[in-house]
Amino acid sequence: MILAALDAYYARLRDDPESGIAAPGYSPQKIGYALVLGAGGELIDVEDLHEQAGKRRIPRLLSVPQPEKRTVAIKPNFLWDKTSYALGVSATSKRSEQEHAAFKALHRDALAGADDPGLRALLAFLEAWSPARFHDHPRIAPHGDNLLDANLVFRLDGETRYVHDRPAARDAWERLQGQSGGGLRGTCLVTGRQAPLARLHPAIKGVNGAQSSGASLVSFNQPAFASYGKEQGENAPVSEQATFAYTTALNYLLRRDTRNRQRLQIGDTTVVFWAQAADAGQAAQAEDVLAAFFDPGNADERATARLQGALEQVRQARPLRELGADLDDDTRIFVLGLAPNAARLSIRFWETSSLGAFASRLADHYADLALEPLPWRRPPTPQALALATAPIYDGRAKAEDVPPHLAGELTRAILTGARYPHSVLAAIVMRFRADGEITPLRVALCKATLARAARLDRQHRHHTDKGEPPVSLDPGNTDPGYLLGRLFSTLENVQRAALGTKVNATIRDRYYGAASATPAIVFPVLLRTAQSHLGKLRKDKGGLATNLEKDIGQIVDALPPSFPPSLDIQAQGRFAIGYYHQTQARFARPDAQDADDTASEGDAE
C-alpha cells in the first residue's frame, strides 16, 4: 500500500514540470562543484555550486545518473562522484587510489568510441589526470581542502549544460543500465505487471537519525530474512521501474529544503504527507490544509484560513466542497512516519483516509484540547504537544527528551481519532510532579486524553462514571480529583495573599506532587497552615479573608467525608485540570486581589 501510493505520487510529480522530479534512471543529489574541461581534457576552472541558505552554504541539488548503492564494495557512479572516485583524493577514504581506478575503468569502457565533444573531453581528462596534481593545480588551489570529498560533476567549457545532461551521455547511461540488467522477471507487487525485478532498492535519505548515506525501506541481507532460496529483492518482488518511482518520490518528500512543507519532525519520527486526487489542484489544496495543521508558522495565511474554514464546515456537518471547487471531501490523504533503525527504516505509522475524514478527526482533536479562556493564538501542533511531555529545564523543553515512541503514537491518535496513548497522561503527570510546570499546553493535553477516553467509552457503551473534564471552571463538578485540585489552588492563593508574592517556596513548590498523589496525608496539614494564614489576613484584609474562607468551605463541603488516601493517574490528571481552572478563574473575577499566576506560558502555541 505504501509503495503503491508513492508510485502514484511519482506519476503526479512527473506530470508537473515545476516539481523538478528526476526522470527514470536519475536522482537528485547534492553537488558541490563542477569541473570545467577544455576540448582536450584540460582542467579550465572549478565552479563552486554551493548556494547560500541563511548563514550556511549548501550544495546544489542536481539531477544526475542514479548513484550506486555502496556498502563495502567499490562502485563508481556514472559521470559524477565524490573526489575519491573522480580525482583519487580524499580526506577520509583510505582506498581512493582503487576508487579512482574503478571510476576511470567504468568510463573508459562505457564511453569507448564516443564522438561527443563533452564525453571525449571527460575521457581525455581522466587519462591525463594524476591525483598528485591536486594540491598544486592553480584552478583547484583557491578552493583548497573544501573540495575534498565533495560531489563533482563535469561541464565542457563554453556550454551551460553539464556533461551528464548531454544527449550522448543520456544514451550512454541508458545502454549502461541495460547492460547491468539481466535479473529475474516476475510479477511486480506494486503494479501487478510482469517486469524486471529490482535486486537492490536505492537508499532513502533525509530521515533524522538514520545513516547520512541513506537507509533502506526494503532490504534482505541475511539468510534469516530470505525464504525458499530467494535472494535479496526477490523476497519482495518490486519492478525496477516501481522501485525507482517510490524511492524517488519518498526522497523528494524528505528533501531538506526550507520550501518543503511536506516534511516535519515529531520527536524521533520524521513525517511526510501528500494527497492524491483526480485533479492536481485539489491535491495541492489538500496538502496546504495539512501543512497548516502540522506547521502553521510556515503556512501562508490562505492555507491557515482554509484549515479553519474546513474545521468550521465539519462542526456544522457541511461538506468541504462548499468552500470551493478546489477542496474535495474525497481527496485521499497519506501520512507516513519513519524512524531510524540501524541501516534500515522502521514505519512508525502509516495513515490514509479522505480529506473529509481527516478534517473531522482534527476537529475532534481541537475540541478535546479546548480550554477557556483560550491560552494560545493558534492551535498547538503535534510537535508542540509531543514537546509538552518532555521535562522543562531553564524554562524550555528539548525535542531529544521526548520519549521516542510517544511522539509517533500521539500523532497516530490525532490522525485516526483513536485514544491518545496512555503513556501521554502518565508522562504529563510525572512532569507536573517533577518540574512543577503546570503549563496551559500540558493541561490541555491532559484534559484531551481524559476527554477522549470518556467519550469513546460512552460511544462503545463501556460502563464509566467519569464524564469529560470541563473546558473552564465548573463549580458543580463533584469529581474528587478535580475538587482537590481546586482546593490546592485556593490554599495556595491564601498563602500568597497572606505572605505576599515574594515567598521563597509556595505550597505548590513543596507539596504539589504529594498532594496530587496522597491527599489524605498532605491536605490536613495544608488546611491547618491555611488557618494561620487566614488569621493573619483577617487583621489587614478582612473581606478578602472571608471570601477565601468561603471558597475553601464550598469545595470541602463537596468532597467526601474523608480525603482519599491516594489518587490514580486519571484522578491526578483531573487534579491538575482543577488546579489550572481555579487558578485561571481568579483573574476573571473583577474583585480579584490575588498574586499573579506563576503557571508558565512557555509551551503555549
Image (spheres, rainbow, N blue to C red):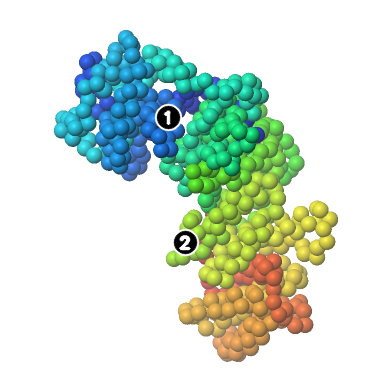
Q: Quadrant of the C terminus?
A: bottom right
Label 2 amino acid? Arg
Front residue of 350 and 16: 350
Residue at numbered disc 1: 67
| Left or right relative to 204: residue 101 | left
Residues packed near mark 1 inside 10 Å, few (<14), some (14 to 19) or many (20 plus)? some
| Left or right relative to 177: residue 80 | left
Please identify the quarter of the rendering in which residue 174 is found: top left
Front residue of 269 and 449: 269
- Residue 289: give x, y in percent of width and height: 60, 38
Label 1 amino acid? Pro
The residue at the point 61 percent across, 67 percent down is 429
- Residue 290: give x, y in percent of width and height: 59, 40
Front residue of 111 and 354: 111
- Residue 95: give x, y in percent of width and height: 30, 37
473, above or below 119, in the image: below
Residue at numbered disc 2: 396
The residue at the point 38 percent across, 33 percent down is 74
| Left or right relative to 43: residue 544 | right
Circle on res. 278? none
Please identify the quarter of the rendering in which residue 125 is found: top left
Q: In which quarter of the image is the N terminus?
A: top right
The image shows a total of numbered marks equal to 2
Asked if residue 475 can be seen in this view, the reply is: yes
Q: What element carries label 1?
A: loop
